[in-house]
Amino acid sequence: MSVRANWSQYKYQWLSGLFIIILSIFIHLSFLVPGSEQGDFFKRLEGLAYDLRLQATLTMHPKRAFLPIIIVDIDEKSIKKLGRFPWSRSVVAKLHKKLVDAGISVIAYDVLFSEPEINPIDRVINKSKNEILNNALSEIRDNYDADKTFASALSESDSVIGLLLEHNQTLQVGTMPESVFQSDVSFEALPAPEFSGYVAGLDLLQQTVLGNGFINSAPDEDGFVRYAMLLAKHNGQLYPSLSLEVARLYTLSDNIKVESTEFGDDYTITGLKLGMETIPTDDYGRVAIPFRGPAFSFPYVSATDVLDSKFDATLFDQSIVFVGTSAVGHADLRTTPVGVQYPGVEVHANLLEGLIFPELLPSRPDWIDGAVVLVLLVVGLLGVFVLPKLELTGIVVYSFVSINSFLSLSIYGWSQHYLDFPQVSILAMLILQVVVLGSLSFLNEHKQKIQIKNIFDQYVPPAHIQSMLDNPKSLSMSGEKRYMTVLFADIRNFTAISEQLNASELKALLNLYFTPITQIIFKHEGTIDKYVGDMVMAFWNAPLKVNKHEQHAVLCALKMQRQVQALESELAKQNMPKLEIGIGINSGDMNVGDMGSVYRRAYTVIGDAVNLGSRLEGITKYYGAKILVSEITYSNCKDITFRPIDRVKVKGKETAVSIYEPVGLTAELDSERIKKVNLHKKAWASYLKQNWDESLQGFTTLMNNHPEEKLYGIFCERIKNLRMSDLDEDWDGSYKHVTK
């Protein structure tokens, strides 16, 4: 099919498919790239796809490294025994010492220590007016100072306490620690999240603790915690998250180097260098949290069991401890892809494991958005050119294969390489293309079926119409060259007949004739081309393929002649004249298609082979033959017996053509008819060899036995003339007709 024909048939599908590709690229680049502030709906869909993929691949990491992290849990059991949290810092100090004695490496508190604890000695002094007693109590005051006790405990180990960053500028509690970050560009130029307020730990604790980290979570717009910010900005300084600060102490790093790159007039963050290892981040210093599994995937030990020494001390040797709470009502439960009511302290634990083993961090490299656009273009264009040509089953198979192939590749990249490949824009494009292009294909097919029915309803056998409706793509309406057979049938002496009848009688006569003739053509799988007055034109092998179409046409012609004979009695009853028809049949290459002008079109055939069929019909009257077929038609009808009629040059042609008249199906001929045909063939063969006496004798015998047949008289007269003539050496027995 030509490009123009394809465009005419599929232009709406192609344009719709291209629009969907452009729309999908726009959605991705506008709403789904990091840092975009719009498109909450699409972000939620991307988040849902992220969650489903993460949940589906939690068990696909058999070689994953595990960091020795233990969570000391201020759980319901601990609160029931020790009372509502926060507890006295002396209790926390005791807990801390127990952990230090067990050989821990780093202790991190997912807890704020921002307000001083009231010393009980101060309460007594404030109420007592006894100066001597107050002086004595002042001397022992420090022994009962829980904050100092806790500060002393913190100095015995590598410890990190939490701080909280706020967007409220008026909320500034305590003193922020010194920044542990380094950068080749100013902190102000880096696009880290910025906060104007804070709640920091007590100055007393700040003086002894080795690390401070913010405990803020960074939920997406739908409230799910999927990503974590590793650094944040306050008052021109950068501060680490709790997990990042623990990682710094665990790796014995003095500071954290921020790696960045220029992006136009601004900078983007590319990673954080911790010791010799670089942690890749997004442009804003965020990473995806590498969840180990659902809640309680890390070892949990109740805080009260630690205080009561009811724990396995060897479990804590060289491990990292996070102290936090899983108790309901303490506002530290998060919604995550691996579960709701997920302890916030375990989020920090998951993040720390990814920071120590960066290969576990799901990554979105800088090139990934370009890769998404490339996939959208390649897969989208494939759908544009494939989907319009598919039927329902093909569309279902295509959608299943394409969507599942993409999901499988996405899961493979995630499970084997921790590649966080965006999914929503590509899946949306695939689904939209299947729905829209599939619907347009159905509408186009329905329109095509209506068009086919309108064009062929009166000209094509009902079985062919149904076949075309079932498979409209097998039909080509555009012009094409095809080997076909054409039939012309004309009522002889129609002018004289029409002069005998009035208009209504003539109409009745033609209806009586055309109705059964049309049925016969349809029964033999022919297509009606047109009716012109008393002439009917039909062809075979278009619009649908017809096997042995030459034989179908010849058998149709024989049946038409029998039908005309059968009409004699009915015509006689209605006082109508007798009908005789002549039929010409030819096979060959013809041009077939929907042809005409903008005002009127028709599905028809044209070409020299068509013209020859018309000429053969025209000379049937000359020979007195009912049916004449060309040599090419004759040669493809092995089951039918023919008698040769002549070699002729019809008007407008200089090439001689052998013509034949069908006698009937060979299997149905009786001995008399076979004998007659054989005698005819013998006389014809002698004629071509210029054996005039033998040929004349044969045709004379046939003429005497069948005086009603005009053909034999023609040859007897022709032979008498030829035997008196000087014939050229290349004489081939042909006779030239000068009229149609």
Image (cartoon, grey):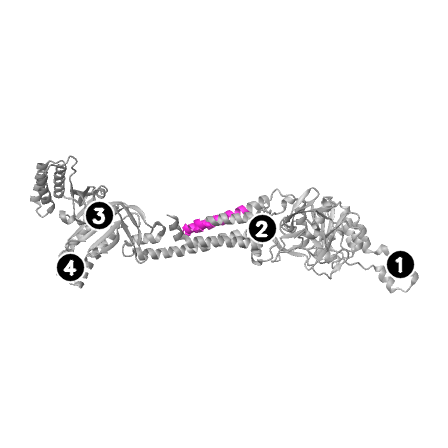
In the image, residue 359 above or below residue 340? above
Per the image, the residue denoted by label 1 is 137
Per the image, the residue denoted by label 3 is 613
Residue 450 in the figure: left or right of residue 628:
right
**Towards the viewer: 18 or 597:** 597
The stretch drawn in magenta includes residue 404: yes
Lower sequence index among marks 4 and 2? 2
How many angstroms separate mark 4 from mark 2 (CA)?
A: 87 Å
**Towards the viewer: 440 or 244:** 440
**SS at mark 4 in the image:** helix
The main secondary structure of the magenta stretch is helix
Q: Quadrant of residue 135?
A: bottom right
**SS at mark 1 in the image:** helix
Q: Amino acid at mark 2?
A: Gln
Mark 4 crowd level (few <14, some 14–19, many ≥20, 10 Å Cα): some
How many angstroms separate mark 2 from mark 1 (CA)?
A: 60 Å
Q: Position of residue 378 (x, y in %)?
A: 49, 47
Q: Which residues are magenta?
A: 383-410
Mark 3 crowd level (few <14, some 14–19, many ≥20, 10 Å Cα): many
